Image: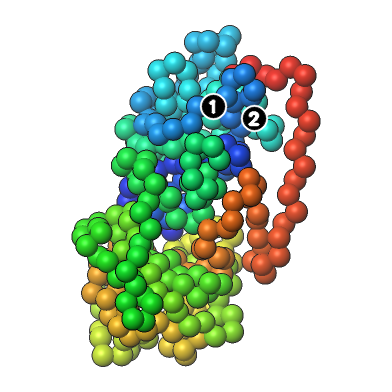
Amino acid sequence: MPELAPVGPVVIVVSLPEQLAYVYRNGVRIGVSTVSTGKPGHETPTGVFTILQKQREHYSNLYDNAPMPFMQRLTWDGVALHAGRIPGYPASHGCVRLPYAFSEKLFATTSHGMTVVIASEASHAPEVASPGWFAPVDPATGAPRTPIEDADASGDVWMPERAPEGPLTIVLSTRDGTLVVLRNGVEIGRAAVQVVDEPMHGTHAYVLLEGPGEGPNAVLPDHPSLRWLAIPVPDAGTPPEGDLHQALATGRIRVADAFAHRVYEALRPGATVVVTDESIQRAPPSGALTLLRADGTAVAPATPSPAPTQPPLE
């Protein structure tokens, strides 16, 4: 869902225990995909890598000229991201295979020199090896994030000096009653919000437009209103017109005035707001991803197919 953060620094985290690749832009997860990494004897290396080379059409120099569409090289000795067969378990010769359609979209999103972190439970902390909604590493260096601290008397945190400039993304979880503010991929603020009943279902995104809006400001009545445009999000459903505005205006979502004022002053055209009924708290690491339906019930994990006696060549 690249619409959640249209601009900002991009970083990829590949979780070996989960066999998943996470894509973050401006600190927010915009994509996740199943992968197939190195089989026993050809394990995918862990660590921090950069994209050294990109080729839409590439053929392996090591394994019978095997096709490697949308190749993004991570090492000069043969490790790369590319489209390939995803059997549900590690089966490559060290590369990170991706589904074809996802690899094509990812290829269009990345750039040379961009950071890719490949993590296991042994090589990285749990929050990196099993990441969540927010990027667990710095997009420039791949180093683990420093947790934001120093809450004020209300329990809110506001540290704009951590990222003085850059695109702004706000994520509000009605499940957790938590609002997180990120700028240039760095968390600069966090606050508790009051949520009454179930004000919204699914995940919805909005972008701030130029110029003043119409009517009163739903959050800060003494401030001019702003113009927000709903962004189409795949599988988000169709919320009632003005649903977020109505939730704020009627008090079903309540943000403390002091924190709302800080956010208001930081807003610039192009800023995005994401409202979701998913939890944005990092789940305890378990080596597997738990998928939740919109009603909060868990989706039963698929049972991996048995490994073939002769896995396909890379």
Above-or-below relation of 245 to 147:
below
Q: Which residue is mark 1?
A: 44
Number of other residues with Cα within 10 Å of mark 1, as a class: few under 14, some 14 to 19, many 20 or more: many
Residue 126 can be seen in this image: yes
Instruction: Indicate the secondary structure of the residue bearing disc 2.
Output: loop
x and y percent of residue 76 in the render?
Answer: 40, 18
Above-or-below relation of 104 to 137:
above
Q: Quadrant of residue 218?
A: bottom left
x and y percent of residue 279 in the render?
Answer: 55, 65
At 55% across and 19% down in the image, what residue appears?
A: 67
* The C terminus sits in image quarter: top right
Instruction: Indicate the secondary structure of the residue bearing disc 1.
Output: loop
At 69% across and 35% down in the image, what residue appears?
A: 88
Q: Quadrant of residue 254?
A: bottom left
Amino acid under disc 2: Pro
At 44% across and 37% down in the image, what residue appears?
A: 117
If you read the primary sequence from the N terminus, does the residue marked by circle 2 or circle 1 appear first?
A: 1
At 36% across and 75% down in the image, what residue appears?
A: 156
Q: CA distance from mark 2 to mark 1?
A: 9 Å
Q: Which residue is mark 2?
A: 90
x and y percent of residue 55 in the render?
Answer: 42, 24
Above-or-below relation of 248 to 13:
below
Q: Quadrant of residue 182?
A: bottom left
